[in-house]
């Protein structure tokens, strides 16, 4: 069987606190250097890489001279803000050594649940990838407390995988992969080599975090794999210190635990859209635009829109109708209904004059459009 990683073009890599900080001893620049070298090699092959990295709190604790993890949430938040500086510096210089630019993106789960912010985050990250930049993502710990309390960058990794339609999620941790029980407590536990993501029995294998630094343990990783599979991405859980782990995984080698997505990407995205999204309005399109999106798989441009119905915001789901009123598809609108009314029938060169800003050229990007 070929590994789904071998053909993965867009890969999200998540590294946990215990690994990044060598169990709290401070950010492990050598380990980060090794992942950055491998990510740069994969970018050179034409792949797109996104890093979701924990470690800000642990690094902040070290910089502030705190030996014990504080209990007060505001102290954890302060530590994260201090530590994030160090984390960003190390990623930036490690990637720069390989001629790769990096970008720091701090997100919350709520950002990705809000449709407008979801689209904004998606456009920014896709633009960074197009520019050949590796985004380094962490939770925006300053403005949230739940994630800090529960320690949940595994979920963030999966949400980013969904957001970007990535092909694979690689979760690097301090164990070889998922075992049949927590190997720290059960030395005879067996490594699970492969399973379908979302298999309920896997959840019973997972204990909590093994160290005082990591927070989520294996359960959040198994749930992250289940979530990633909803947009068609398979997940690998592997040991972050395995030599050349990322390069070898991408070459198709079987390392750690592979949690396979069962649904193909397109079908998964369609399912995701129909599960998540409620119709807020519609646009009617001319025959030319209908043919382009139906037969040519193209995005819907405002120039093909003849009418705008309803009251919707950027990021809402709208239906795309033929002149006859028959629905041909639905998708996430890049513009609100009032903006769409201004730019309907107009070419993108006129958007700035009509709207006062330059937005996307598409009303609905083809990646956000599903046919009915
Ligand atoms: N079934 C299991 N297989 C592997 N590790 C497990 C399992 N159950 C619990 N663990 C624990 O989960 C830990 C990894 O989670 P965590 O400490 O949150 O790491 P990270 O910081 O990488 O997210 C391991 O060190 C291990 O002790
Ligand atoms: N955002 C936090 C990390 C949250 C967390 O503990 O994540 P993880 O170690 O991946 O389970 C930080 O940078 O310290």
Image (tube, rainbow, N blue to C red):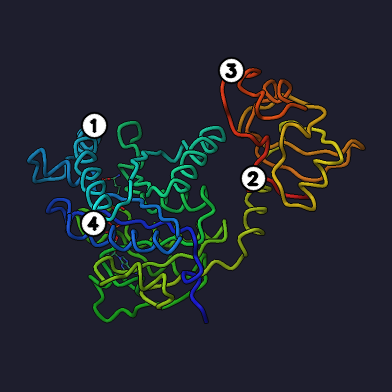
Which mark, residue 74?
Answer: 1
Precedes in sequence: disc 1 or disc 3: 1
Spatial CA span between label 4 and label 3: 43 Å
Spatial CA span between label 3 and label 2: 25 Å
Image location of residue 240, percent across then percent down = 28, 65
State which mark lies toward you, 4 or 1: 4
Precedes in sequence: disc 4 or disc 1: 4
* Residue position for label 2: 368
Mark 2: few/some/many CA within 10 Å (<14, 14-19, 20+): some
How many tags in the picture?
4
Precedes in sequence: disc 3 or disc 2: 3
Image location of residue 38, percent across then percent down = 31, 63
* Residue position for label 3: 356
Spatial CA span between label 2 and label 4: 34 Å
* Residue position for label 4: 32
Precedes in sequence: disc 4 or disc 3: 4
Spatial CA span between label 1 and label 3: 40 Å
Spatial CA span between label 4 and label 1: 27 Å
Does the beta carbon at disc 3 come under 8 Å from ligand 2?
Answer: no
Precedes in sequence: disc 1 or disc 2: 1
The correct choice, above or below, for 99 with respect to 264 in the image is above
Mark 3: few/some/many CA within 10 Å (<14, 14-19, 20+): few
Which mark, residue 283?
Answer: none
Depth check: 348 or 56 in front?
Answer: 348
Left or right: 333 as drawn, with respect to 328: left
Left or right: 208 as drawn, with respect to 227: left
- CB atoms at circles 4 and 1 under 8 Å apart? no
Image location of residue 24, percent across then percent down = 15, 53
Q: In the image, what residue occupies the spot 38% across and 54% down?
A: 154
Mark 4: few/some/many CA within 10 Å (<14, 14-19, 20+): many
Precedes in sequence: disc 2 or disc 4: 4
């Amino acid at each position: 069987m070929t590994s789904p990683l071998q053909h993965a073009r867009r890969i999200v890599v998540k590294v946990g606190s215990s690994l990044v900080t060598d169990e709290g001893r401070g950010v492990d620049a050598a380990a980060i250097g090794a992942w950055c070298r491998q990510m740069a090699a994969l970018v050179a092959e034409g792949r797109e890489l996104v890093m979701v990295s924990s470690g800000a709190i642990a690094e902040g604790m070290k910089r502030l001279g705190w030996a014990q993890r504080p209990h007060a949430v505001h102290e954890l938040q302060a530590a994260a803000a201090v530590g994030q500086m160090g984390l960003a510096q190390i990623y930036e210089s490690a990637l720069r050594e390989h001629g790769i630019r990096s970008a720091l993106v701090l997100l919350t789960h709520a950002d990705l649940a809000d449709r407008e912010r979801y689209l904004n985050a998606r456009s920014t990250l896709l633009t960074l990838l197009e520019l050949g930049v590796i985004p380094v993502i962490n939770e925006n710990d300053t403005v949230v407390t739940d994630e800090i309390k529960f320690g949940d960058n595994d979920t963030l990794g999966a949400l980013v995988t969904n957001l970007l339609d990535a092909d694979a999620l690689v979760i690097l941790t301090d164990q070889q992969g998922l075992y049949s029980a927590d190997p720290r407590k059960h030395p005879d536990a067996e490594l699970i080599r492969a399973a379908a993501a979302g298999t309920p029995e896997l959840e019973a294998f997972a204990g909590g975090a093994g160290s005082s630094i990591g927070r989520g343990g294996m359960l959040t990783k198994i749930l992250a794999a289940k979530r990633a599979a909803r947009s068609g991405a398979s997940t690998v859980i592997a040991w972050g210190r395995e030599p050349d782990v990322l390069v070898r995984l991408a070459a198709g080698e079987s390392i750690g635990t592979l949690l396979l997505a069962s649904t193909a990407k397109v079908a998964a995205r369609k399912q995701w859209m129909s599960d998540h999204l409620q119709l807020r309005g519609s646009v009617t399109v001319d025959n030319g635009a209908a043919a382009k999106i139906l037969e040519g798989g193209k995005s819907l441009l405002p120039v093909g829109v003849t009418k705008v119905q309803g009251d919707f915001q950027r990021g809402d789901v709208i239906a795309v109708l033929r002149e006859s009123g028959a629905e041909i598809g639905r998708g996430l609108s890049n513009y609100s209904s009032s903006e769409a009314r201004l730019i309907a029938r107009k070419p993108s060169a006129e958007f700035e004059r009509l709207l006062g800003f330059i937005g996307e050229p598409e009303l609905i990007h083809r990646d956000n459009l599903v046919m009915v």
